[in-house]
Image: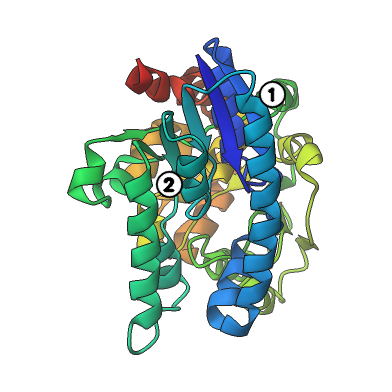
């Protein structure tokens, strides 16, 4: 089976599509990439929604990328036509080009996050709801172009329109092989004082970094727990302000994607998401799967999808509860042996259920 991974996705910023590609190849599919990264992350796209005068930048970049995608697609079609086209994450516009260029192929749309969901989570709907209606229209048009819609949790699947839901599959986010390789090495290292925890993310409302920062404030006098916060984004300034009293917190602007697996594997704990917005209750984030694959204890919020997918391989706390988060970190600092057991449990569960091969299986089953 020949599958083309297509679009303006960027695996360095959103590794989801890399997991799917690796998994499809592990099943024996021939996967060709036709990719021109747009160079605008979620935060930049949100800025365009807030400041419409930036829209020409998006249009210009999209046209440049689409020209490259179209030319490469036409070149490859001279040799072989794909059986299916996988449109990568944030492909709300790319899916239209994919359908135009490959009218006979099965179009797979990775629809982990809806445009309307982003607008709601980031409070962009406005008093008249015009932006929200626009985002819903973008979602509807994108979903209409797809033959198979890929989501990451049952909760995300249930949020799809009923007619789309029947043609959808659930593929957890998972992690690439580099994470598992880093985790195997990390488990050779014991958990020792001080307990080292890390958060990596874009500081979005889904992540709930002010909750983490509140917990760090509670733990300000506990020198047995050190936390590294990696990334920047919407709630970054608020998080820094709330955690300013804790001298055991380090702030890192970013870590390159190729260095991230070994970096995270150097920590005992990987912090997940703690937000209370609707999106936070429907997803299991990259960082949970990656942290588990890297051999770290996953501490994240107690939501239905995370409870179901992670089970006993994580410490779950009430969404939005900084007190429970602080208590969970204290518990791990109190019992290094238990922390090591949880690290191993997390890795074993990820190895069994969330390798790329396991993650991509539902796609191949749907394609037959």
Outermost residue, top side:
28
* Residue 203, x across and y down, in percent: 61, 65
Residue at coordinates 27% horizontally, 52% vertically from top-left? 159
Left or right: 252 in relation to 87? right
Instruction: Judge left or right: residue 11 versus residue 23.
Output: right
Residue neighbourhood size for the residue with mark 2, other residues' Cα within 10 Å, grouped as few (<14), some (14–19), many (≥20) = many
Q: Is residue 218 left or right of residue 119?
A: right
Left or right of 225, for residue 148: left
**Can see residue 244?**
yes
The image shows a total of numbered marks equal to 2
- Looking at the image, which is closer to me, 74 or 46? 74
Give 33 or 168, whichever is nearer the viewer: 33
Q: How far across and how far down the image is residue 53, in percent? A: 62, 84
Rendered image quadrant of residue 137: bottom left
Residue at figure coordinates x 58%, y 27% from the top left: 21
Q: Which mark is residue 187?
A: 1
Classify the position of the C terminus by image quarter.
top left
Q: Is residue 106 above or below residue 365?
A: below
Q: Secondary structure at mark 2?
A: loop
Tell me, for residue 111, which label it has, or none.
Answer: 2
Question: Which mark, by number, is residue 308?
Answer: none
Task: Report which quarter residue 337 is drawn in.
Answer: top right
Determine whether 11 is above or below 18 in the image: below
Q: Does 289 appear above or below 273?
A: above
For label 1, the SS is loop
Q: Residue at x 45, y 63 (%)?
A: 275
Q: Nearer the viewer, mark 1 or mark 2?
A: 2
Residue 154 x, y percent position in the rendering: 30, 40
Q: Residue at x 74, y 46 (%)?
A: 194
């Amino acid at each position: 089976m020949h599958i083309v991974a297509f679009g303006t996705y960027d695996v360095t910023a959103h590794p989801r599509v890399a997991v799917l590609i690796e998994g499809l190849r592990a099943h024996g599919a021939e996967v060709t990439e036709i990719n021109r990264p747009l160079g605008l992350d979620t935060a930049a796209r949100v800025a365009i929604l807030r400041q419409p005068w930036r829209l020409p930048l998006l249009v210009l970049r999209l046209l440049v990328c689409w020209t490259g995608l179209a030319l490469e697609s036409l070149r490859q079609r001279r040799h072989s036509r794909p059986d299916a086209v996988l449109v990568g994450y944030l492909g709300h516009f790319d899916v239209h080009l994919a359908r135009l260029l490959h009218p006979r192929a099965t179009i797979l749309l990775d629809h982990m996050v809806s445009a309307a969901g982003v607008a709601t989570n980031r409070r962009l709907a406005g008093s008249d709801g015009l932006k929200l209606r626009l985002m819903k229209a973008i979602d509807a048009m994108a979903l209409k172009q797809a033959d198979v819609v890929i989501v990451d949790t049952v909760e995300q699947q249930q949020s799809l329109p009923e007619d789309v839901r029947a043609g959808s599959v659930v593929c957890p986010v998972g992690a690439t092989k580099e994470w598992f390789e880093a985790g195997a090495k990390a488990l050779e290292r014991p958990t020792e004082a001080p307990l080292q925890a890390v958060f990596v993310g874009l500081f979005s409302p889904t992540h709930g970094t002010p909750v983490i920062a509140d917990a760090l404030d509670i733990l300000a006098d506990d020198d047995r727990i050190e936390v590294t916060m990696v990334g920047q984004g919407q709630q970054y300034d608020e998080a820094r302000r709330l955690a300013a009293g804790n001298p055991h917190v380090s702030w890192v602007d970013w870590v390159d994607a190729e260095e991230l697996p070994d970096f995270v594997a150097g920590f005992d704990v990987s912090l997940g998401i703690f937000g209370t917005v609707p999106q936070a209750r429907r997803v299991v984030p990259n960082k949970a799967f990656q942290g588990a694959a890297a051999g770290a204890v996953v501490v994240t919020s107690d939501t239905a999808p995370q409870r179901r997918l992670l089970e006993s391989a994580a410490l779950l706390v009430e969404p939005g509860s900084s007190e429970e988060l602080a208590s969970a970190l204290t518990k791990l600092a109190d019992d290094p042996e238990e922390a090591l057991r949880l690290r191993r449990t997390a890795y074993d569960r990820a190895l069994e259920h969330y390798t790329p091969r396991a993650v991509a299986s539902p796609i191949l089953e749907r394609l037959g």
